[in-house]
Amino acid sequence: MALNFGDRDQSVPFWFPIAGDYQEELNGENNLIGVPSYSEYWVTIPSNYGSIWTVTTNT
């Protein structure tokens, strides 16, 4: 989960603990495919909003 309380979209580094495909659950946009585990991954969080992802592993 990532939250942005600012007035502008923000790009921030994020580290996901599990490799796989991440589905964004709030609005179904900004899904992340092929995310590596524990590698810096940049995501953009909309202003005054947030993102929640769930993962499907590729095992």
Image: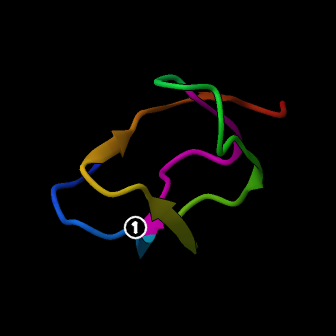
Residue drawn at (57%, 45%) of the image: 18
Part of the protein shown in magenta: 14-24
Residue drawn at (53%, 65%) of the image: 43
Nearer the observer, 2 or 59: 2
Residue 10 in magenta? no
Q: Regarding mark 1 in the picture, which secondary structure is present there?
A: loop
From the viewer's perspective, is residue 15 above or below residue 46? Answer: below
- Please state, as top left, top right, bottom left or bottom right, where the N terminus lies in the image: top left
In the shown orientation, is residue 8 left or right of residue 5?
right
In the shown orientation, is residue 34 left or right of residue 15?
right
Residue drawn at (30%, 44%) of the image: 49
Nearer the observer, 24 or 46: 46
The image quadrant that residue 14 belongs to is bottom left
Q: Position of residue 17 (x, y in %)?
A: 48, 51
From the viewer's perspective, is residue 44 above or below residue 40? Answer: above
Residue bearing the label numbered 1: 9
Q: Total marks drawn? A: 1
From the viewer's perspective, is residue 1 above or below residue 48? Answer: above
Q: Position of residue 26 (x, y in %)?
A: 46, 24
- Please state, as top left, top right, bottom left or bottom right, where the C terminus lies in the image: top right
**The furthest residue to the left:** 5
The image quadrant that residue 50 belongs to is top left
Residue type at the position of mark 1: Asp
